[in-house]
Amino acid sequence: MSQVMEVVGGKWRLNVLWVINKYQSIRFNQLKREVNGITTIMLTRSLDILITNELVEKVDFQTLPLHVKYQLSSKGKSLMPLLKQINQWGKLYL
């Protein structure tokens, strides 16, 4: 469990995963707007951890101006049923 918490724990990472899943593919600034209250630094750190742990993929379209989007990897997608259950639990009990 501690390994899981190292990757998805913290204030922002589950929210970041949730929003990326909602949009399927999303640019950094849109993601920042959707994750209410997150700073640029915290979003960057969260994405770095999620990318390093292969839950999120960074897609670079190799264009100018720079065009990058983030999407869930297959590993990240496999986490979504659990997050949906946690979300339902929260609606019932919190």
Image (tube, rainbow, N blue to C red):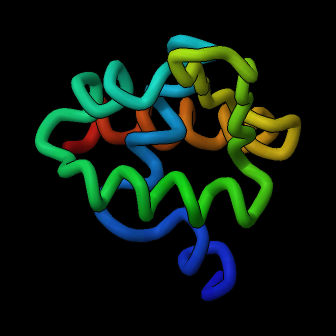
In the displayed structure image, the side of residue 88 where residue 78 appears, left or right: right
Front in this rendered view, residue 4 or 70 = 70
Residue 67, given in percent of the width and then of the height, sits at 58, 19
Residue 48, given in percent of the width and then of the height, sits at 57, 60
Residue 65, given in percent of the width and then of the height, sits at 51, 17
Tally of numbered discs: 0
Front in this rendered view, residue 94 or 44 = 44
- In the image as oriented, which residue stretches furthest toward the right? 74
In the displayed structure image, the side of residue 45 where residue 39 appears, left or right: left
Residue 21 seen by the camera: no
**Image position of 43 with respect to 62: above or below:** below
In the displayed structure image, the side of residue 30 where residue 66 appears, left or right: right
Screen quadrant of the C terminus = top left
Residue lying at 48% horizontally and 32% vertically, measured from the top left: 18
Residue lying at 29% horizontally and 33% vertically, measured from the top left: 32
Indicate the quadrant where residue 58 lies.
top right
Front in this rendered view, residue 63 or 19 = 63
Indicate the quadrant where residue 16 lies.
top left
**Image position of 43 with respect to 23: above or below:** below
**Image position of 74 with respect to 13: above or below:** above
- In the image as oriented, which residue stretches furthest toward the bottom? 2
**Image position of 52 with respect to 5: above or below:** above
Indicate the quadrant where residue 41 lies.
bottom left
Residue 66 seen by the camera: yes
Screen quadrant of the N terminus = bottom right
Residue 55, given in percent of the width and then of the height, sits at 73, 49
- In the image as oriented, which residue stretches furthest toward the front? 64
- In the image as oriented, which residue stretches furthest toward the left? 37
Residue lying at 68% horizontally and 55% vertically, measured from the top left: 51
Residue lying at 25% horizontally and 49% vertically, measured from the top left: 40
